[in-house]
Amino acid sequence: MTSTPVAVPDQTREAVVAGIPVMFWNPERKTNIWGRRALRFRPVDNFGDLLGPVVVKGMIDRFGGTPPQGDAARRRLFAIGSILQFSRPGDVVWGAGVNGKVDPGTYRLEGLDVRAVRGPQSRALLQDRFGLDVPEVYGDPGLLLPYLRPEVTEWAKTKKHDLTVVPNLNDLRSAPRTKDTVSPRDELWSVIKRIVQSRLVVGSSLHGVIVAEAFGIPARAVVSPEESAFKYEDYLLGTGRAPEGAFAPTVERAVAMGGAQPPAWSAQPLLAAFPRDLWKS
């Protein structure tokens, strides 16, 4: 896993969930389709990044909450993904993390309201470099799907696939086209259904691993030539595991190794850290 830290323009979108903007990464990229003399642009719709608003809505459906009024309605929530470089003072963080591919010198993180982060490496950077108060509450909110989406738990009871390979978005072009390979840009629920109905999930998509592990399915991360190791290590450390020996160099090796050590993690601290105060109870 290699990368050179860079500065990037804002590539987030917002989905308003019960009056609160939930931010998620979804930039537009050129397609091969021409229209009105210009290339068309479409959002990448990477399934893992689309999970943020889904999980937040699930939390509101479970615990309740009504839309806020006035200034409270302008606070933004960052819930999933390596997207803190796009935050601004006053934003709320619940389970998002630092992007290892972005130069920390470009971050403007002073004034964040942090309730939880993906892992201890994100916590250390927020505390040491920006002086933020960051609780020791870790975990990607995608791990909460079993608590929030009972239909997915039902899907997971039936295993139809011995193997599913989910490459990272940036590895998709070089990924082998086999019956076992799933594009992370496919429709969100079709990707999740495929993952939870598998006996083993491997690949460089971090959320492919996260969703599998959320439902107790063996999973193994594959080294990505396009991605920094930071987010993978951050997630592993945040779920009670050491990164050493956790990654496979290739899909073939990942299959031979089988699933990594499962998470040693409790969902309760992350559930309890959900910023319900953003909504009226």
Image: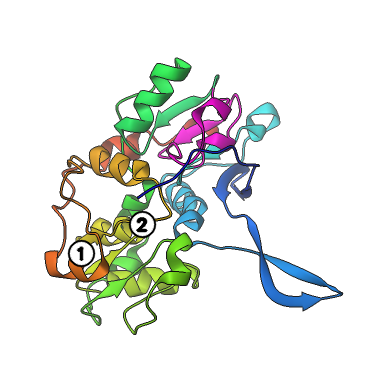
Of residues 11 and 155, the one drawn nearer to the viewer in this rendering: 11
From what the image shows, is residue 256 above or below residue 20? below
The boundaries of the magenta stretch are 83-109
Residue drawn at x 43%, y 54% is: 226
On the question of residue 148 being in view, the answer is no
Residue 7 as seen in the image, left or right of residue 93: right
Marks 1 and 2 in Cβ contact (< 8 Å): no
From what the image shows, is residue 205 above or below residue 119? below
Residue 113 as seen in the image, left or right of residue 206: right
Residue drawn at x 49%, y 73% is: 186
Residue drawn at x 52%, y 31% is: 92
From what the image shows, is residue 128 above or below residue 40? above
On the question of residue 176 being in view, the answer is yes
Query: What's the CA distance linking mark 1 and mark 2?
Result: 21 Å
Q: Main secondary structure of the magenta part?
A: loop
Residue drawn at x 34%, y 61% is: 208
Of residues 55 and 59, the one drawn nearer to the viewer in this rendering: 55
Query: Residue 50 at x, y = what percent?
Result: 51, 57
Amino acid found under the numbered disc labelled 1: Ile
Query: Residue 243 at x, y = what percent?
Result: 21, 43
Q: Secondary structure at mark 1?
A: loop
Amino acid found under the numbered disc labelled 2: Ser
Q: Residue furthest bottom?
A: 179
Residue highlighted by disc 2: 224
Residue 5 as seen in the image, left or right of residue 139: right
Disc assigned to residue 34: none
Q: Residue furthest right?
A: 36
Residue highlighted by disc 1: 217
Of residues 17 and 234, the one drawn nearer to the viewer in this rendering: 234
Query: Residue 84 at x, y = what percent?
Result: 51, 36
Q: Residue furthest top?
A: 131
